[in-house]
Amino acid sequence: MKWVKRIALAVVIGFALFYTITRPEDAASAVQGAVAAVWGAVESVGTFFTSLAS
C-alpha cells in the first residue's frame, strides 16, 4: 500500500510542476484562491469561538 501512496504523491507533484511551468499565472491564481479559502475558514472558526465565549 505504501507504493500506491508514493505513486499517487509523485503524480500529484508532477502535475503541480507541469501546471506551474506551463501556466504560471493560473497556478498563482489557484494558490491565491486556496489561501483565501483557508484564511476564510480560520476567520469563521475565530468568529465562532468569539461568539461562544461572549
Image (tube, rainbow, N blue to C red):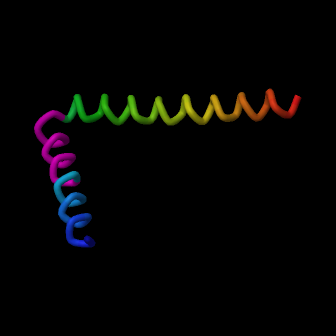
- Answer above or below: position of 52 versus 17: above
Q: Residue 5 location, x and y as percent?
A: 26, 64
- Answer above or below: position of 26 versus 17: above
Count of numbered labels shown in the rendering: 0
Q: Residue furthest front?
A: 1
Principal SS element in the magenta part? helix
Q: Is 20 displayed left or right of 40 in the figure?
A: left
Residue displayed at 15% across by 33% down: 23
Instruction: Name the image quarter holding residue 47.
Output: top right
Q: 47 or 20: nearer the eye?
A: 47
Q: Residue furthest right?
A: 54
Residue displayed at 55% across by 29% down: 40
Q: Residue 34 location, x and y as percent?
A: 40, 34
Instruction: Please identify the quadrant where the C terminus is shown.
Output: top right
Magenta stretch: give its range. Answer: 13-23
Instruction: Please identify the quadrant where the N terminus is shown.
Output: bottom left
Residue displayed at 18% across by 49% down: 17
Q: Is residue 21 magenta?
A: yes
Q: Residue 45 location, x and y as percent?
A: 66, 34
Q: 34 or 2: nearer the eye?
A: 2
Q: 3 or 43: nearer the eye?
A: 3
Q: Residue 18 location, x and y as percent?
A: 13, 45
Residue displayed at 39% across by 29% down: 33
